[in-house]
Amino acid sequence: MSVTLTFLGTGTSQGVPLIGCPCYVCQSNDEKDKRLRSSVLIQHNTNTFVIDTGPDFRQQMLREKIKNIQAVLYTHSHKDHIAGLDDIRAFNFLHKKPVDIYATTEVQDAIKKEFSYIFSDEKYPGIPQINMHTIYDSPFSIRDTLFTPIQVMHYKMPVKAFRVGDITYITDANFISDAEKQKIKGSEIIIVNALRKETHISHFTFQQAIDLMHELKPKKAYFTHISHQLGTHKEVCAQLPGWIQPAYDGLSISL
């Protein structure tokens, strides 16, 4: 199963640089230190999927020159992961059909609340057109691409990670049960959030993410959902073994 994953964004809910922040990371001229909100693009055969549509979704689609997507999958309902949903309208206009959305019932409820106009009985012309599909705990296929959902915890909020082939993508987590880790084991590439070095209530710290990768033993690992508090890309690279790297916006990996 040949899969290409592109990091659309690798930053936290406020992105990097933060508005008004004078720190050396936010003031860095290195493009790898400029992080949009976390999201990835997955390409398999002729299929193109997006995991999460954050506030930077439009900018990310333009940067990667994406002309069509087969579906959007959602990890959870926080604004930095769903706020860009309205911009799927572009694909509606281009292809004259709804976009398939895959989400848990909890995320669907949040989308219906945040984007109530999409579901109104009297629909305003030009609103997004979507088809909702429910994610449960079992693997599911979209066309010929198999996704395995993995439940992780973001403090007290359940979040879905996804395994596609031998690549696993985990964002916004600070706990994974042993049973769910079994679904991840054997992945050749694992992507996981590593927010900062200091303890955080709902995200893995830098060291916790390193320890998790040593436990799960992928051939390659990438950190995402990185805050300005972690340091520059260059600094973080210097603190990691060669098989673990901080991801950056626009990076593509294939397996």
Image: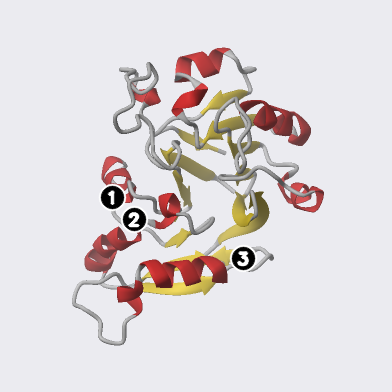
Residue 21 horizontal/vertical position (percent): 33, 26
Under circle 2, the secondary element is: loop
Write the residue at 35% across / 79% down: 119
Q: Quadrant of residue 188?
A: top right
- In which quadrant of the rendered image does the C terminus lie? top right
Write the residue at 60% across / 40% down: 203
Task: Report the residue marked by disc 1.
Answer: 58
Q: Nearer the viewer, residue 151 or 199?
A: 199
Task: Report the residue marked by disc 2.
Answer: 84
- In the picture shown, does residue 246 fall above or below 132? above
Residue 92 horizontal/vertical position (percent): 27, 67
Is residue 48 visible to the viewer in this orientation of the structure? no
Counting residues from the N terminus, which is met first, the one under dot 2 or under dot 3? Answer: 2
Q: CA distance from mark 1 to mark 3?
A: 27 Å
Compared across the picture, whether 99 is left or right of 43 comes to: left
Q: CA distance from mark 1 to mark 2?
A: 7 Å
Whether pointer 1 and pointer 2 mark residues with C-beta atoms closer than 8 Å, the reply is yes
Q: Quadrant of residue 185?
A: top right
Q: In front: mark 2 or mark 3?
A: 2
- Residue sticking out furthest to the right: 178
Under circle 1, the secondary element is: helix
* Identity, as a three-letter code, of the amino acid under mark 3: Phe
Is residue 102 visible to the viewer in this orientation of the structure? yes
